[in-house]
Each structure stands twice: as C-alpha cells, then as structure tokens.
Amino acid sequence: MTPPSTARLKQLDRDHHLHPFTDFKALGEEGSRIITSADGIYIHDADGNRILDAMAGLWCVNLGYGRQELVDAATEQLQQLPYYNNFFKTTHPPAVELAETLCRLAPAHMNRVFFTGSGSEANDTVLRMVRRYWALKGKPEKQWVIGRENGYHGSTVAGMSLGGMAPMHEQGGPCVPGITHIRQPWWFSEGRDMSPDEFGRVCAQALDERIQELGADKVAAFIAEPVQGAGGAIIPPDSYWPAIKEVLAKYDILLVADEVICGFGRLGEWFGSVHYGIEPDLMPVAKGLSSGYLPIGGVLVGDRVANTLIDEGGEFYHGFTYSGHPTCAAVALKNLQLMEQEGVVEHVRDVAGPYLAKRWKELEQHPLIGEARSLGLIGALEIAADKTTGQRFDKSLAVGNLCRDICFETGLVMRSVGDTMVISPPLVISVEQIDELVDLARAALDETARRLEARGVTLDPSMETLA
Ligand SMILES: *Cc1c(COP(=O)(O)O)cnc(C)c1O
C-alpha cells in the first residue's frame, strides 16, 4: 500500500487531528509541517527540507535521532516481553534494572523510584506523595504546595495546577485546591531595577513571605524547575537557589525539583539539582530519560519520604497501567548506559556547554537582542525593541512567532515563548554544529529585523550595522 501523498496527509491532518497546545482553527488555515525522518541533530520534512533541531524534539531527544542501539533495545524487549505490569507483586528485568541505574545516578539520598508514563503523571504522583507523606507524619493539615508563576509541570489537571501558566489556569480551572504560586526569578523581565543577585534574594524572600501567610504548619512542599524550561529557559540569578534553600531549611517543608528538562545532563550534571547544590526530597523526571524514543517518566524519592511511605504507609493506592512499561524501561536503560559510556554529561559540562556559552553570548551584540543567556545546553535570547531598557516590541507584532517561523523556513527549530527565543539542542551536538546553530540563529534574527522594517517598524539605529 502506498502511503498518502503529502498534500493528502495535510488535508487529513486538518480534517481529523487536534494538535496539542494549538489554535485548531488557525492551524487548519495554515496547515501543518509533516516531519518524516531524522538523524543526529537534524529532522527532515515531507517537503524535502533538512532542519537543525535546536529543541531536541521537545527538550527530550538528548542522544539525537537514529540511534540504532535504542532501536535494538526496543526490538529485543518487544520480542522478549512487550508488556507486563508492576502491580500485584510482579515486575520484570527492565523496570528493576532501570530503577537501580536511576538511583545510582541520582544524589546519594535518593534510593527509590516510582515509574509513570510522562512528566505530567510524575507531577500528579508528586502531589499524591507529598500530601500522603504529611498525613502519615500526623500533620494532615500540611496540604499547601507552593509553585511559581510561569512554572511548567505538565498538562494533566494536577500538572497544570502545580504549574503557573495563567492561560492554562483560565481554560482548565478551577485548579486543584491547595496550590499557590509565587513570583519567578526572571531577571530580564521582572528584575531590571536591581542587580541580578539582589533580585534572586527578593524572589526567595517571596517564598518566605508566602509560607508565613499560609502558616508553615499548613505548607507541604515547594515545587520548582532548577531552570524554568517552557517558561522561557529562565536561568535564575546565582543567589536564588542558595536563598531558597535557606528559607526551606527554616521551615519543615519538602522540596520538589522538577527535573523533567534539567535532568540527564541538560545543565552539565546528571541533574539540575546537582548543578545548584540543592537536595530535593522528590525529583520528577521524564523527557531525556529515554531521549524521547518512548514515553516514560518517574519520581525519584529521597529516603526521608520513601522510608515513611514504606514503613508507615500500607498500600499506596496509586499507579498507572504503564508504570515501568518494560519496553520503555529497556530503552531508557540503554539510553542511560549510552550516556555513561559516551561521557555525554561530561561533553555538555566541559565542551559543548562552555562553547555554546561563548558563541551564544555573541548574539547579544545583535540589535534585536536584549539578553543572550545559556547554561549547559539550554539557552534563550530576549528580543527587545530597546536593548538598553529591555523594552519589548508591541505585542501585536508577535515578533517571537515571526522569528520562529523564519527559523523554520531557513532550517532551524528554535522555539518562541512570547518574545523569548529558546534552544535546548540534543546533548550530543558538536562544536561545529554549535557554530552552524549560532549562524542560523543570527541569520534568522537579521531576517526578522528586515521584515519588521518592511512593516514600517523603526528599529534601533544600531541596525545600520546589518549587512
Ligand atoms: C514537559 C514537562 C513536564 C510534563 O511532561 P509530559 O511528559 O509532557 O507530561 C513537566 N515538567 C516539566 C519541567 C516539563 O518540561
């Protein structure tokens, strides 16, 4: 049977497929791009374009596309035992081996893992666990979980509620009760009237104040991404995490570090928490765990919570059909083994991360860019109408989306979050490929500037320096 033509696929997509995080009507009018194959850090579309995927799919294809070892791991497991569950006192080798490997790679105090099918399910599990933990400790009134505005913890009802994405709350509410949000440590957007370090401390102070308002005896946990991903690759000021750590130490409150993006090498350590020297009680993981080849997530559980759930909890009434799915677990296990064998985390920490930092910072010279920041292999560009004050372009211009569309046309996947451009490339990217990425990004910025001018937008006079 011959597969449908590209035109036919696009029509069928319009007719039948509701895409995630998409304006259905607008997409129906524009039509979608059909990705047909990929290798290394490049994807290929049905129209014959080769595109450098600087988002690693959705922050997940850390080992890059086309890794035969992962294909083989899946094939072998599908033949051996495609599916069996972990309920009712059973398990299978891939789930056990993956659990052991994860706990070996995690900080020393984390020795248990609960598997899920995704990052959202991992955060649902987090909410169940922290409330269960405090109930078992005889403090059932410790219910509140504090998250952050513009944080992202997934799209299930609990994930959405823990996250601080206002548009999601507006559509999906009312949210799960007992969740509240404090301000985010986004210096470029919210902290420019003070130094980054001052601002970091002010944001941590907001946590202290919220805890006092709610009463420490009512607060179960604080949840945050070490570096906010979906919010716009927001790297907190250096002062932020140490100050947060101090606040949490003052009160008896659990720390949940959402490692769904930062985990598995993105920041140049196995976990973002290690980079920042924080010791979370729980770490939800997903995405890079399997390099995105198959869906799998989990929650790494520190000894304090795990021992209570084990020793005092009885049955924990929670789990998913696909918790620890053998084929997904086999691929995740192989993915971690390859990362270890190939020194991928060291490559990010010692080679690719520092090189990207240097090349990426050069883009700050571009007239459209107010700030270029990166850490490990996550980075962002803040597009601004005025470089010095950081003032944004008029919202109606949708400059971020314009730039993103130009990137796609010119062979680069770079995501836009408002007027923040974001990258999170495969961790195996080479220095030559980083050069290619930066060149493509600069060309896209130049083209964005030209199109703005063509629409009559007056740009910063320094735009004359453009070729
Ligand atoms: C993507 C993401 C999630 C949700 O993961 P899904 O697998 O999409 O459910 C949760 N937390 C963070 C930090 C994420 O980036």
Image: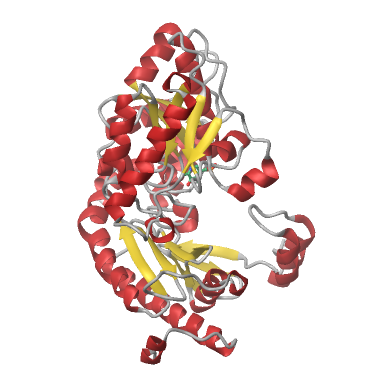
Q: Residue at x 33, y 20 (%)?
A: 303
- Quadrant occupied by the C terminus: bottom left
- Quadrant occupied by the N terminus: bottom right
The answer, for residue 39, to whether it is visible in the render is yes
Residue 418 in percent (x, y) is at 53, 63
The answer, for residue 267, to whether it is visible in the render is no
- Quarter-wise, where is residue 100 in the image? top left
Relative placement, left or right, of 354 versus 156 is: left
Q: Which residue is nearer to you in this view: 262 or 248?
A: 248
Relative placement, left or right, of 296 versus 435 is: right
- Quarter-wise, where is residue 278 in the image? top left
Residue 405 in percent (x, y) is at 56, 73
Relative placement, left or right, of 271 versus 287 is: left
Q: Residue at x 23, y 53 (%)?
A: 349
Q: Which residue is nearer to you in this view: 298 or 200?
A: 200
Specify the farthest residue to the right.
Answer: 15
Total label count?
0
In the displayed structure, 249 sits above or below 237; it is: above
In the displayed structure, 264 sits above or below 393; it is: above
Q: Residue at x 55, y 26 (%)?
A: 84
Specify the farthest residue to the left.
Answer: 350
Residue 105 in percent (x, y) is at 28, 35
Residue 37 in percent (x, y) is at 53, 63
Q: Which residue is nearer to you in this view: 147 or 416?
A: 147
Q: Residue at x 67, y 46 (%)?
A: 170
Colouring of the image: secondary structure
